Amino acid sequence: MIYRFQSIYTYFANYQVQFLQIKNFKMRVLPILICATVLFISSCKHDEHEKHEEQTFQLTSPIRMDTSITSEYVCQIHSIQHIEIRSQERGYLQNIYVNEGQYIKEGQLLFQIMPKIYDAEVARAKAEVSLAQIEYLNTKALADSEVVSLNELAMAEAKLNKAKAELSLAQAHQEFTQIRAPFSGIIDRFHVRKGSLIEEGELLTELSDNSKMWAYFNVPEAEYLDFREHTKKDTIIDVNLLMANNKVFDQGGQFETIEADFNPETGNIAFRATFPNPNNLLRHGETGNILWKTKLNNALLIPQKATFEILDKIYVFVVSEDGKVESRQVFIEAEMPHLFVIKEGLTTEDQILLEGLRKVRNNDIVKYEHLDPKSVINQLDLYAE
Protein backbone atom coordinates (compact mmCIF):
# COMPACT_ATOMS: atom_id res chain seq x y z
CA MET A 1 0.00 0.00 0.00
CA ILE A 2 2.85 2.38 0.88
CA TYR A 3 4.62 1.40 -2.33
CA ARG A 4 1.56 2.31 -4.46
CA PHE A 5 1.23 5.72 -2.77
CA GLN A 6 4.88 6.53 -3.48
CA SER A 7 4.38 5.57 -7.17
CA ILE A 8 1.38 7.91 -7.55
CA TYR A 9 3.27 10.74 -5.85
CA THR A 10 6.27 10.26 -8.14
CA TYR A 11 3.97 10.34 -11.27
CA PHE A 12 2.35 13.67 -10.29
CA ALA A 13 5.69 15.21 -9.38
CA ASN A 14 7.08 14.35 -12.82
CA TYR A 15 3.96 15.75 -14.56
CA GLN A 16 4.33 19.06 -12.65
CA VAL A 17 7.97 19.35 -13.73
CA GLN A 18 7.02 18.76 -17.36
CA PHE A 19 4.22 21.35 -17.17
CA LEU A 20 6.62 23.97 -15.77
CA GLN A 21 9.12 23.20 -18.49
CA ILE A 22 6.48 23.65 -21.25
CA LYS A 23 5.29 26.92 -19.68
CA ASN A 24 8.83 28.27 -19.51
CA PHE A 25 9.38 27.25 -23.14
CA LYS A 26 6.26 29.19 -24.26
CA MET A 27 7.33 32.25 -22.29
CA ARG A 28 10.70 32.18 -24.07
CA VAL A 29 9.39 31.44 -27.60
CA LEU A 30 6.39 33.85 -27.66
CA PRO A 31 8.45 37.10 -27.71
CA ILE A 32 10.59 35.62 -30.47
CA LEU A 33 7.51 34.88 -32.61
CA ILE A 34 6.12 38.40 -32.10
CA CYS A 35 9.43 39.97 -33.14
CA ALA A 36 9.61 37.74 -36.22
CA THR A 37 6.08 38.71 -37.27
CA VAL A 38 6.82 42.44 -36.93
CA LEU A 39 10.03 42.06 -38.93
CA PHE A 40 8.15 40.14 -41.66
CA ILE A 41 5.42 42.80 -42.01
CA SER A 42 8.02 45.55 -42.13
CA SER A 43 9.91 43.63 -44.75
CA CYS A 44 6.74 43.27 -46.88
CA LYS A 45 6.02 46.98 -46.67
CA HIS A 46 9.61 47.73 -47.53
CA ASP A 47 9.42 45.37 -50.51
CA GLU A 48 6.12 46.92 -51.62
CA HIS A 49 7.60 50.39 -51.31
CA GLU A 50 10.57 49.26 -53.34
CA LYS A 51 8.19 47.85 -55.98
CA HIS A 52 6.41 51.26 -56.26
CA GLU A 53 9.79 52.84 -56.70
CA GLU A 54 10.81 50.30 -59.31
CA GLN A 55 7.51 50.44 -61.35
CA THR A 56 6.81 53.49 -63.48
CA PHE A 57 3.15 54.56 -63.44
CA GLN A 58 1.43 56.39 -66.30
CA LEU A 59 -0.19 59.74 -65.54
CA THR A 60 -2.21 62.17 -67.63
CA SER A 61 -4.13 65.40 -67.07
CA PRO A 62 -7.72 66.50 -67.68
CA ILE A 63 -8.19 68.26 -71.01
CA ARG A 64 -10.66 70.88 -72.16
CA MET A 65 -12.21 70.48 -75.60
CA ASP A 66 -15.45 70.88 -77.53
CA THR A 67 -17.39 67.65 -77.79
CA SER A 68 -20.93 66.32 -77.73
CA ILE A 69 -22.94 63.79 -75.77
CA THR A 70 -25.80 61.67 -77.07
CA SER A 71 -28.78 61.07 -74.82
CA GLU A 72 -30.95 58.06 -75.57
CA TYR A 73 -34.69 57.84 -74.89
CA VAL A 74 -37.07 54.95 -75.53
CA CYS A 75 -39.82 56.06 -77.91
CA GLN A 76 -43.14 54.86 -79.28
CA ILE A 77 -43.74 55.48 -82.99
CA HIS A 78 -47.14 56.58 -84.32
CA SER A 79 -48.48 57.39 -87.77
CA ILE A 80 -49.24 61.04 -88.35
CA GLN A 81 -52.82 59.87 -89.00
CA HIS A 82 -54.17 56.59 -87.68
CA ILE A 83 -57.94 56.08 -87.62
CA GLU A 84 -60.54 53.35 -87.28
CA ILE A 85 -62.81 52.68 -90.26
CA ARG A 86 -66.33 51.94 -88.98
CA SER A 87 -69.66 51.26 -90.62
CA GLN A 88 -72.27 54.01 -90.60
CA GLU A 89 -75.09 51.72 -91.67
CA ARG A 90 -76.45 48.29 -90.83
CA GLY A 91 -76.49 45.51 -93.40
CA TYR A 92 -74.67 42.61 -95.00
CA LEU A 93 -71.13 43.22 -96.24
CA GLN A 94 -71.55 42.72 -99.99
CA ASN A 95 -67.97 43.24 -101.16
CA ILE A 96 -64.40 44.09 -100.10
CA TYR A 97 -62.37 45.93 -102.75
CA VAL A 98 -58.92 46.10 -101.12
CA ASN A 99 -56.49 43.80 -99.36
CA GLU A 100 -54.83 43.98 -95.96
CA GLY A 101 -51.57 45.96 -96.01
CA GLN A 102 -52.42 47.60 -99.33
CA TYR A 103 -51.61 51.24 -100.05
CA ILE A 104 -54.82 53.05 -100.99
CA LYS A 105 -55.60 56.55 -102.22
CA GLU A 106 -57.99 59.10 -100.80
CA GLY A 107 -61.58 58.44 -101.95
CA GLN A 108 -60.89 54.83 -103.01
CA LEU A 109 -63.80 52.40 -102.42
CA LEU A 110 -63.00 49.96 -99.60
CA PHE A 111 -66.24 48.18 -98.61
CA GLN A 112 -69.75 47.86 -100.00
CA ILE A 113 -72.75 47.14 -97.76
CA MET A 114 -75.75 45.60 -99.52
CA PRO A 115 -77.68 48.71 -100.70
CA LYS A 116 -81.08 47.28 -101.73
CA ILE A 117 -83.06 48.62 -98.79
CA TYR A 118 -81.38 52.03 -99.08
CA ASP A 119 -82.00 52.11 -102.85
CA ALA A 120 -85.69 51.52 -102.15
CA GLU A 121 -85.74 54.30 -99.59
CA VAL A 122 -84.25 56.69 -102.16
CA ALA A 123 -86.82 55.66 -104.77
CA ARG A 124 -89.68 56.24 -102.35
CA ALA A 125 -88.26 59.61 -101.34
CA LYS A 126 -88.02 60.64 -105.00
CA ALA A 127 -91.67 59.70 -105.52
CA GLU A 128 -92.66 61.79 -102.52
CA VAL A 129 -90.77 64.75 -103.99
CA SER A 130 -92.55 64.34 -107.34
CA LEU A 131 -95.94 64.22 -105.63
CA ALA A 132 -95.18 67.25 -103.51
CA GLN A 133 -93.90 69.10 -106.59
CA ILE A 134 -97.20 68.48 -108.46
CA GLU A 135 -99.29 69.58 -105.48
CA TYR A 136 -97.20 72.72 -105.14
CA LEU A 137 -97.59 73.65 -108.80
CA ASN A 138 -101.37 73.10 -108.70
CA THR A 139 -101.72 75.14 -105.52
CA LYS A 140 -99.61 77.92 -107.00
CA ALA A 141 -101.81 78.08 -110.10
CA LEU A 142 -104.92 78.32 -107.95
CA ALA A 143 -103.28 80.93 -105.73
CA ASP A 144 -102.39 83.02 -108.78
CA SER A 145 -106.07 82.86 -109.75
CA GLU A 146 -106.99 83.79 -106.16
CA VAL A 147 -108.91 80.54 -105.79
CA VAL A 148 -106.94 79.45 -102.74
CA SER A 149 -105.32 81.50 -100.07
CA LEU A 150 -101.62 82.22 -99.81
CA ASN A 151 -101.45 80.10 -96.65
CA GLU A 152 -102.38 77.00 -98.62
CA LEU A 153 -99.63 77.84 -101.12
CA ALA A 154 -97.12 78.17 -98.28
CA MET A 155 -98.22 74.80 -96.87
CA ALA A 156 -97.72 73.14 -100.25
CA GLU A 157 -94.28 74.68 -100.55
CA ALA A 158 -93.33 73.45 -97.08
CA LYS A 159 -94.53 69.96 -97.96
CA LEU A 160 -92.32 70.03 -101.05
CA ASN A 161 -89.27 71.14 -99.04
CA LYS A 162 -89.89 68.38 -96.52
CA ALA A 163 -89.99 65.77 -99.27
CA LYS A 164 -86.73 67.08 -100.70
CA ALA A 165 -85.08 66.89 -97.26
CA GLU A 166 -86.23 63.29 -96.84
CA LEU A 167 -84.78 62.50 -100.26
CA SER A 168 -81.42 64.00 -99.25
CA LEU A 169 -81.45 61.92 -96.06
CA ALA A 170 -82.24 58.73 -97.97
CA GLN A 171 -79.45 59.47 -100.47
CA ALA A 172 -77.02 60.02 -97.56
CA HIS A 173 -77.89 56.62 -96.10
CA GLN A 174 -77.45 55.13 -99.57
CA GLU A 175 -73.98 56.72 -99.91
CA PHE A 176 -72.95 55.38 -96.51
CA THR A 177 -73.25 51.84 -97.86
CA GLN A 178 -70.09 52.62 -99.85
CA ILE A 179 -67.18 53.04 -97.43
CA ARG A 180 -64.32 55.04 -98.94
CA ALA A 181 -60.85 56.06 -97.70
CA PRO A 182 -60.83 59.52 -96.08
CA PHE A 183 -57.10 59.92 -96.90
CA SER A 184 -54.27 58.02 -98.57
CA GLY A 185 -52.52 55.41 -96.47
CA ILE A 186 -52.01 51.72 -95.66
CA ILE A 187 -54.99 49.54 -94.77
CA ASP A 188 -54.70 47.36 -91.68
CA ARG A 189 -56.16 43.92 -90.96
CA PHE A 190 -59.88 43.29 -91.56
CA HIS A 191 -62.14 42.65 -88.57
CA VAL A 192 -65.01 41.43 -90.78
CA ARG A 193 -65.34 39.27 -93.86
CA LYS A 194 -67.52 39.30 -96.96
CA GLY A 195 -71.09 38.29 -96.06
CA SER A 196 -70.84 39.41 -92.43
CA LEU A 197 -73.83 41.18 -90.93
CA ILE A 198 -72.53 44.64 -90.09
CA GLU A 199 -74.01 46.71 -87.29
CA GLU A 200 -73.96 50.48 -87.30
CA GLY A 201 -70.67 51.70 -85.84
CA GLU A 202 -68.94 48.31 -86.12
CA LEU A 203 -65.14 48.36 -86.59
CA LEU A 204 -64.10 47.21 -90.06
CA THR A 205 -60.36 48.02 -90.20
CA GLU A 206 -57.77 50.75 -89.49
CA LEU A 207 -56.08 53.16 -91.87
CA SER A 208 -52.61 54.71 -91.34
CA ASP A 209 -50.97 57.62 -93.10
CA ASN A 210 -47.26 56.81 -92.75
CA SER A 211 -45.88 59.63 -94.87
CA LYS A 212 -44.62 61.15 -91.62
CA MET A 213 -44.14 59.48 -88.26
CA TRP A 214 -44.43 60.87 -84.75
CA ALA A 215 -42.04 59.51 -82.12
CA TYR A 216 -43.10 60.10 -78.51
CA PHE A 217 -40.45 59.80 -75.78
CA ASN A 218 -40.51 60.55 -72.06
CA VAL A 219 -38.09 63.02 -70.49
CA PRO A 220 -37.48 63.29 -66.70
CA GLU A 221 -38.47 66.50 -64.99
CA ALA A 222 -34.90 67.60 -64.24
CA GLU A 223 -33.85 67.21 -67.88
CA TYR A 224 -36.99 69.03 -69.02
CA LEU A 225 -36.17 72.00 -66.78
CA ASP A 226 -32.57 72.10 -68.04
CA PHE A 227 -33.83 71.95 -71.62
CA ARG A 228 -36.26 74.85 -71.17
CA GLU A 229 -33.62 76.88 -69.35
CA HIS A 230 -30.91 76.52 -72.00
CA THR A 231 -32.96 76.32 -75.21
CA LYS A 232 -34.44 79.34 -76.93
CA LYS A 233 -37.97 79.30 -78.28
CA ASP A 234 -38.39 78.12 -81.90
CA THR A 235 -34.92 76.53 -81.87
CA ILE A 236 -34.70 73.70 -84.41
CA ILE A 237 -33.36 70.55 -82.73
CA ASP A 238 -32.31 67.62 -84.89
CA VAL A 239 -32.64 64.08 -83.56
CA ASN A 240 -32.07 60.59 -84.92
CA LEU A 241 -33.94 57.33 -84.51
CA LEU A 242 -32.28 54.07 -83.50
CA MET A 243 -34.55 51.26 -84.71
CA ALA A 244 -35.16 47.93 -83.03
CA ASN A 245 -32.48 46.25 -85.18
CA ASN A 246 -29.85 48.66 -83.75
CA LYS A 247 -29.60 50.52 -87.05
CA VAL A 248 -30.08 54.28 -87.31
CA PHE A 249 -33.04 55.31 -89.48
CA ASP A 250 -31.80 56.94 -92.68
CA GLN A 251 -34.06 59.98 -92.28
CA GLY A 252 -33.29 62.57 -89.62
CA GLY A 253 -36.07 64.01 -87.52
CA GLN A 254 -36.82 67.19 -85.66
CA PHE A 255 -38.09 67.80 -82.17
CA GLU A 256 -41.41 69.66 -82.44
CA THR A 257 -43.51 69.83 -79.32
CA ILE A 258 -43.96 68.96 -75.64
CA GLU A 259 -47.15 67.66 -74.09
CA ALA A 260 -49.02 69.79 -71.58
CA ASP A 261 -48.82 67.66 -68.41
CA PHE A 262 -46.36 65.56 -66.47
CA ASN A 263 -47.19 61.98 -65.63
CA PRO A 264 -47.59 62.09 -61.81
CA GLU A 265 -46.71 58.39 -61.49
CA THR A 266 -43.39 58.51 -63.37
CA GLY A 267 -42.46 62.20 -63.10
CA ASN A 268 -41.86 62.34 -66.86
CA ILE A 269 -43.27 64.49 -69.64
CA ALA A 270 -43.69 63.39 -73.26
CA PHE A 271 -41.74 65.04 -76.09
CA ARG A 272 -42.59 64.51 -79.76
CA ALA A 273 -40.27 64.33 -82.76
CA THR A 274 -41.34 64.05 -86.42
CA PHE A 275 -39.58 61.90 -89.02
CA PRO A 276 -40.23 61.81 -92.77
CA ASN A 277 -40.97 58.28 -93.97
CA PRO A 278 -40.72 58.32 -97.79
CA ASN A 279 -40.17 54.56 -98.15
CA ASN A 280 -42.83 53.57 -95.61
CA LEU A 281 -40.21 51.68 -93.60
CA LEU A 282 -41.65 52.80 -90.28
CA ARG A 283 -45.08 51.58 -89.24
CA HIS A 284 -47.56 52.58 -86.58
CA GLY A 285 -46.85 50.96 -83.20
CA GLU A 286 -43.11 50.41 -83.64
CA THR A 287 -40.61 51.17 -80.90
CA GLY A 288 -37.12 52.61 -81.02
CA ASN A 289 -34.72 54.98 -79.30
CA ILE A 290 -34.39 58.70 -79.87
CA LEU A 291 -30.75 59.81 -80.14
CA TRP A 292 -30.47 63.42 -78.99
CA LYS A 293 -27.03 64.95 -79.43
CA THR A 294 -26.07 67.87 -77.19
CA LYS A 295 -22.98 69.98 -77.82
CA LEU A 296 -20.61 70.69 -74.93
CA ASN A 297 -18.25 73.63 -75.35
CA ASN A 298 -14.94 73.68 -73.49
CA ALA A 299 -15.80 70.54 -71.51
CA LEU A 300 -13.29 69.09 -69.02
CA LEU A 301 -12.68 65.44 -69.94
CA ILE A 302 -10.91 62.51 -68.28
CA PRO A 303 -10.78 58.79 -69.22
CA GLN A 304 -13.24 56.62 -67.33
CA LYS A 305 -10.52 54.06 -66.61
CA ALA A 306 -8.71 56.67 -64.46
CA THR A 307 -11.58 56.62 -61.93
CA PHE A 308 -12.78 54.24 -59.24
CA GLU A 309 -16.00 54.09 -57.24
CA ILE A 310 -16.55 53.87 -53.49
CA LEU A 311 -20.10 53.92 -52.10
CA ASP A 312 -21.57 55.51 -55.25
CA LYS A 313 -18.94 58.24 -55.26
CA ILE A 314 -16.34 58.66 -58.01
CA TYR A 315 -12.66 59.17 -57.13
CA VAL A 316 -9.33 59.60 -58.92
CA PHE A 317 -5.76 59.34 -57.71
CA VAL A 318 -4.04 62.73 -58.01
CA VAL A 319 -0.23 62.58 -58.09
CA SER A 320 1.85 65.57 -57.01
CA GLU A 321 5.10 66.69 -58.63
CA ASP A 322 7.14 64.72 -56.07
CA GLY A 323 5.14 61.54 -56.81
CA LYS A 324 2.89 61.48 -53.76
CA VAL A 325 -0.48 59.79 -54.37
CA GLU A 326 -3.72 61.26 -53.01
CA SER A 327 -7.33 60.16 -53.69
CA ARG A 328 -9.79 62.90 -54.58
CA GLN A 329 -13.55 62.87 -55.20
CA VAL A 330 -14.79 64.21 -58.54
CA PHE A 331 -18.29 65.17 -59.67
CA ILE A 332 -19.55 63.99 -63.05
CA GLU A 333 -21.55 66.28 -65.32
CA ALA A 334 -22.07 63.81 -68.17
CA GLU A 335 -20.94 60.38 -69.31
CA MET A 336 -19.62 59.53 -72.77
CA PRO A 337 -18.16 56.34 -74.22
CA HIS A 338 -14.85 55.87 -72.33
CA LEU A 339 -14.92 59.46 -70.99
CA PHE A 340 -16.36 61.45 -68.11
CA VAL A 341 -17.20 65.13 -68.33
CA ILE A 342 -16.04 66.62 -65.03
CA LYS A 343 -18.22 69.19 -63.30
CA GLU A 344 -16.08 69.74 -60.19
CA GLY A 345 -12.98 68.35 -58.47
CA LEU A 346 -10.20 68.67 -61.07
CA THR A 347 -8.38 71.23 -63.19
CA THR A 348 -6.18 70.93 -66.26
CA GLU A 349 -3.14 71.42 -63.98
CA ASP A 350 -3.76 68.21 -62.02
CA GLN A 351 -2.02 64.92 -62.75
CA ILE A 352 -4.16 61.81 -62.41
CA LEU A 353 -3.15 58.15 -62.34
CA LEU A 354 -4.14 56.43 -65.59
CA GLU A 355 -3.06 52.82 -64.97
CA GLY A 356 -2.45 50.63 -61.92
CA LEU A 357 -5.13 52.08 -59.66
CA ARG A 358 -5.22 48.90 -57.57
CA LYS A 359 -1.50 48.95 -56.93
CA VAL A 360 -1.31 52.24 -54.99
CA ARG A 361 -2.77 53.75 -51.85
CA ASN A 362 -2.98 57.19 -50.30
CA ASN A 363 0.39 58.77 -49.45
CA ASP A 364 2.39 56.27 -51.53
CA ILE A 365 5.40 57.69 -53.39
CA VAL A 366 5.55 56.52 -57.01
CA LYS A 367 7.76 56.96 -60.01
CA TYR A 368 5.76 58.17 -63.00
CA GLU A 369 5.73 59.30 -66.60
CA HIS A 370 3.26 61.90 -67.89
CA LEU A 371 1.31 61.15 -71.10
CA ASP A 372 -0.11 63.88 -73.31
CA PRO A 373 -3.93 64.07 -72.73
CA LYS A 374 -4.69 64.36 -76.45
CA SER A 375 -2.77 61.19 -77.29
CA VAL A 376 -4.55 59.35 -74.45
CA ILE A 377 -7.98 60.36 -75.78
CA ASN A 378 -7.07 59.53 -79.36
CA GLN A 379 -6.23 55.98 -78.27
CA LEU A 380 -9.69 55.48 -76.80
CA ASP A 381 -12.45 53.98 -78.90
CA LEU A 382 -14.73 57.05 -79.21
CA TYR A 383 -15.72 59.92 -81.38
CA ALA A 384 -15.32 63.45 -80.04
CA GLU A 385 -15.66 66.66 -81.96
Image (cartoon, rainbow, N blue to C red):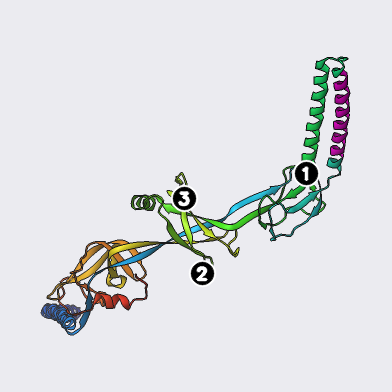
Q: Amino acid at mark 3?
A: Thr
Residue type (three-letter) at the residue carrying disc 1: Glu
User: Which image quadrant: the N terminus?
Assistant: bottom left
- The residue carrying mark 3 is 257
Q: Which residues are magenta?
A: 120-142
Can residue 13 be spotted in the picture? no
Q: Name the residue tied to disc 2.
A: 247
Q: Which mark is residue 18?
A: none
Horizontal relation, residue 168 to residue 311: left or right: right
Nearer the camera: disc 1 or disc 2: 1
Q: Which x, y percent locates residue 168?
A: 78, 36
Front of the two marks 3 and 2: 3
Q: Quadrant of residue 51?
A: bottom left
Q: Main secondary structure of the magenta part?
A: helix
Q: Earlier in the sequence, mark 3 or mark 2?
A: 2
Q: Nearer the viewer, residue 81 or 7?
A: 81
Question: Does the magenta portion include 207?
Answer: no
